[in-house]
Amino acid sequence: MCNACLIEDVKRSMLSRRALFTGAAATTAAAVTAGLTTARPALAQSAGRVVDLTHAYDSDFPTFDGNPGILYEPAVKFEDSGYQLWKLTIWEHTGTHIDAPLHFAADGRSVAELPPESLVCPLCVIDLKAKAAEDANAMVEPEDIEAWISANGEIPAGACVAMNSGWADKVATPAFRTNAEGTFAFPGFSKAATDLLADAGAACIGVDTMSLDPGDSADFAVHYSWLPSGRYGIEGLAGLDGVPAKGATIFVGAPKHKLGTGGPARVMAVV
């Protein structure tokens, strides 16, 4: 299936299926928020090192639909006025950005309605680089989470669980988005894994690719389950090699525009 056809199929599916999740979303979101208080002891005690997990981006940054995610237009020029500023046209889901519940749930929380305490999280990083080197559409599976727990202990309530597939290194190449045949190909989470993380009380999942679901997903199962449950996601993370598997705290600088389904974010970790 062509990329454009896939996007249109997903749009139709979103319209027909969003209503299925609206009832459960508010209940689950309240449970996530309540569980965040137990995450406070798991937050890192800063040693003063801050790691930027955000890509700088411009109109050349790869996007899902292939169109520029940000456009610049001079609004005031320095030579005319002694100062300068741009008029920006930004598509919400570009660069390093947030997926809010409203993105895949008609009555979900907007990005402006995310509880501030959910944006400061213990960070758990699952290394998927070996699997991703073998399969461009590799997924974080329950066994990867169980292996992380065996090595690092339980996942704290309210945590952000991030996948480090090594894909951020490809961001300046076509391989970040598609394979040689022009088909979407990049790692993501499996629904079975995110169901497990939901049961564990995680508040957020993050990926160093363009989508929470892998590139070859035909149904966006993670988007359709994780986001309508009241949780959020981060796509396009950078710098995950610079943080440990556990022990860091992530600070998610989510935008706060009303009715936002997400938006570009500055994401940093303190170690």
Image (cartoon, grey):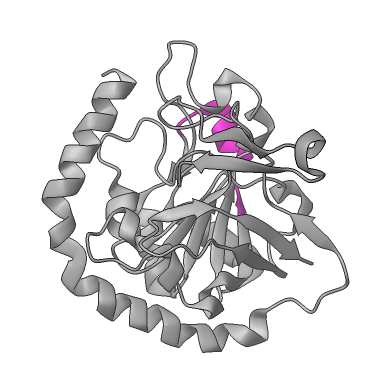
Q: Which residues are magenta?
A: 126-137
Whole-percent x, y for residue 122 in the image: 63, 72
Whole-percent x, y for residue 76 in the image: 68, 41
- Which residue does the image show at 79% across and 79% down from the upper left? 45
- Which residue does the image show at 49% across and 58% down from the upper left? 205
- Give the camera-side residue of 211 and 66: 66
- Res 56 quadrant in image: top right
Residue 59 to residue 259: above or below: above
- Give the camera-side residue of 260 and 214: 260
Residue lying at the far front of the rendered structure:
80
- Which residue does the image show at 19% across and 64% down from the upper left? 21
Total count of labels: 0
On the rendered image, what quadrant is the N terminus found in?
top left
- Give the camera-side residue of 72 and 30: 72
- Res 197 quadrant in image: bottom left
Residue 147 to residue 112: above or below: above
Q: Does residue 98 show up?
A: no
